[in-house]
Image (spheres, helix red, strand yellow):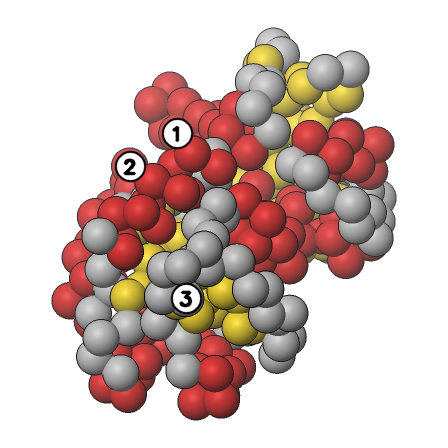
Amino acid sequence: MLYEQELKTFVEGTTNFFEVAAQQPASIGSPYLMEGSPAVHEYTGVINISGKREGVVYFTAPKAMLTVLLMKMQENDFSHETMKDLVGEVANTISGNARRDFGRDFVISVPSVLSGEKPQIPQKPGVRSFIIPINWRSHSAKLIVSLT
Amino acid sequence: MRNGKAVAKNGGKRTLKLMIVDDSNIMRRRIERSQRFEQLELVGTAGNGLEALELFKKTDPDVVTMDITMPQMDGIECIARLVAMKPAVRILVVSALADKATAVEAMERGANGFLNKPFTDRQLNEAIAELMR
C-alpha cells in the first residue's frame, strides 16, 4: 500500500521540473489505478526502486510536449537524442526528490530512458499502478507509480 | 569531449577558465547559455568524469560545474581527482541528487558549492557568484 506522502514526493519531483526549468507550472489531473501495463507515450524515463518498496516509477511524455518544453528552456535542438535526454532529466529530478525524502529506506536506480510506444518496462505482474496525469499547457504526460 | 570556443569578455578582470561536466547535453548547453559572468571563459565541456579528467589536464580550468550521476566515472570521484591535481580549483556541483548525504560527500571531496537541478538562471548565477567570491 502506497502512502499519500510517498506519491506526493514523486508528483512534486515531476511538477517541480516544469515549474523551474520551463518557468511554467504543470497541473495534476485526477489520479487513477489500473492493473497491467499502462499505455505510454513516445518517450519514457524510468527509475527502479527496491528496499522498503519494490517496483518502478516512470514519467512518459509525448514528443509534442517535450518539444514545447525544450523551446521554453531556450533549446534549439529537437532531435531524438535530445528528447531522450530531456525525459531522462525529468526522471533524474524525480529520483533526486525521492532520495531526499525517503533516505536509505529506498534504493533508487539511475534513470534509464526508453523510446517508442511499446517499450519493455520491467513491471511486476499483478501490481496495480497509480497513474497521475501531468498537464502542461495543452499537453498531457503521465507519471506512473507501480510499487509494492 | 567537446572543446568550447574561447570568448574574450574579461572586461579588464582576470579571466577564469570554466569547464562544464554533465552527461546531459541539455544541461551542458543550459549552463553555458545561462551563466552571465564576463570573466568566465568556457574552455570545454565533458560528458563524464573520465572525459573531464582529460579535458582538465589539457585546459587547466579554474572553475568547474560538476554533475554527480554520470557513466564511467561519477562526479564524486572526479571531484577528488581534480582537487588532487589542482587544489585551488573551484567546483560547483550541479545535481538532481537532492539529499544531504550527497552534498556532504561532495563537499568532503573538495567541492565548494552545491546547486540542485532543476535550476533557474538566477539560481545558477548566484551559485557561481558565491563560488567565485
The residue most toward the top is A30
Q: CA distance from mark 1 to mark 2?
A: 7 Å
Quarter of the picture containing the C terminus of chain A is top left
- Mark 1, secondary structure of its residue: helix
Q: Which residue is mark 1?
A: A9
Percent coordinates x, y for residue B2 in the rendering: 64, 75
Q: Are marks 1 and 2 in contact (CB under 8 Å)?
A: yes
**What residue do we see at 57% from left, 41% from top?**
A90
Q: Which residue is mark 3?
A: B15
Q: Chain of mark 2?
A: A
The quadrant in which residue A62 appears is top right
**What residue do we see at 59% from left, 13% from top?**
A27
What mark, if any, has residue A101 been given in the picture?
2
Front position among marks 2 and 3: 3
Percent coordinates x, y for residue B24 in the rendering: 59, 59
Quarter of the picture containing the N terminus of chain A is top left
Is the residue B33 above or below the residue A109 in the image?
Answer: above
